Amino acid sequence: MKEKIIEKFNLGKTLTYDELSYFFNGYLSNDVSDEEMTIVLKNICKNGLSEQEIFDLVDIFIKSGDTLHFDFPTIDKHSTGGVGDKTTLVVLSILASCGVKIVKMSGRALGYTGGTIDKLESIGVNVNLTYEEVLKQVNNIGMVITSQTKNLCPMDKKIYALRDVTGTTNSLALIAISIMSKKIAGGSDNILIDVKVGRGALVRTAKEAKLLANLMISIGKKYNKKVVCMLTRMDNPLGNNIGNSIEILEVLDVLKDKVRNNLYYLSYDMASVMLSIYTGMKIRDARNKVKEAITSGKAYDKFVEFVNYQGGKLEIRLERPIEIYAKESGFIKSIDAKELGSLSMELGAGRSLTNKNIDYNAGIILEKNVCDFVSRGETLCMLYGKNSVDIDRAFKAFKIQKNRPFMKSIIIKIIK
Ligand code: URA
């Protein structure tokens, strides 16, 4: 049967539900090897899947583990992964301070992209909560962030790990199945997906991102879930800070209403869209509520309450950094997100084969961001961490030009 299924994949034939279930469940029970699954994943990357095969695999992934149910209206968010992306922490604090009940299961860093769970662990937040603890907390303070329980979509966990090492991460069908199976199993009625597009993202073009968004929306419809996709740019890092505790510092600044950068604008827009979906209020009214939550300090207080409730401490002390100076004057045209994500990882902020433990205070702070003017000799960014790195890479990530560049909006499109 296994050989027949691989043969059908090789010939580009459509597979039935039973065949897909036999093969994928066989992988989970170790009856199908990594090598056999890799052949199939590579085939999927090359030839795609039919819509029915995608729906069938979502169902098979969901049924591989537990599903959660809440007896109150819920909303969830997911990002396809980026550099400096700490919007979850900002957006959830805003929403919970506006009375939304929100339970978010987050992941760890993957490759050069950061993970919310590592960021929270950097300040001692307990991210291993039981279902009972989650329910108690969401009823008490409105927001919970916890790591994905072991038995929620175990199929995705195993296949994602294989995709990561076999160059099969960027198939739109596989991304849609991976995200939607987790979100549906997580029990939310409403789901906002931030589809990152660009140099620092899995999806490189807006055209592909639209296809992915429409696919996820149609999967959501099958399960009676409202899915809204925001296509957002990930060419430059999001915000000014990259790392773990270093990113928490920026979350505090945004919630204190102290910065106006792409992180602030994206968080503001995302929270407004989510509040409008959750409550049914007009987007204009949602935007006013979100603004008030930030300016009044309610969202900041909610974040502090959340950190304390889950046992964390907001005491972040960074070591002396290495400063990277501009070698010429001009406007910053772009900052290579992928390059700085990898550099931050090498400084110690991410995991690799040689570095299993994260240095929570490692990372990068940008002193200048896109469209800013920099004079020769001024600081472009600061590098934190104990590992030595090629500092020229930081310098080269900044492209500087004479004329002021056109500032593109962080949001490309919202698809419902
Ligand atoms: N995020 C996921 O959860 N899965 C993917 O495949 C890509 C991004």
Image (tube, grey):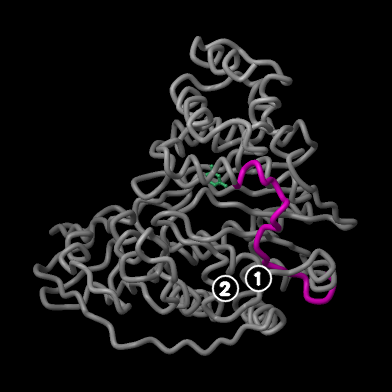
Residue 178 percent across, percent down from the top left = 60, 40
- Amino acid type at circle 1 is Val
104 left or right of 8 in image = right
Q: Nearer the viewer, mark 2 or mark 1?
A: 1
324 left or right of 367 in image = left
Q: Which residues are magenta?
A: 139-157
* Residue 101 falls in image quadrant: bottom right
Q: Earlier in the sequence, mark 2 or mark 1?
A: 2
Task: Report if residue 151 lies within the magenta region.
Answer: yes
Question: Are the residues flagged by discs 2 and 1 in contact, CB closer than 8 Å?
Answer: yes
- Whether disc 1's CB lies below 8 Å from ligand 1 is answered no
Task: Report if residue 379 lies within the magenta region.
Answer: no
| Image region (quadrant) for ligand 1 | top right
Instruction: Look at mark 2 in the image and give the residue it sits on.
Output: 120
Disc 1 is placed on an element classified as loop
- Amino acid type at circle 2 is Leu
* Residue 390 falls in image quadrant: bottom left
Instruction: Look at mark 1 in the image and give the residue it sits on.
Output: 127
Q: 47 or 262: nearer the eye?
A: 47
Q: CA distance from mark 2 to mark 1?
A: 8 Å
Residue name at image x 64 percent, y 26 percent: 23
Residue 213 percent across, percent down from the top left = 57, 36
216 left or right of 320 in image = right
Residue 43 percent across, percent down from the top left = 47, 22
18 left or right of 207 in image = right
Can you say whether 5 is above or below 129 in the image?
above
Furthest residue toward right: 71
- Whether disc 2's CB lies below 8 Å from ligand 1 is answered no
Residue name at image x 42 percent, y 43 percent: 165
Q: How many marks?
A: 2
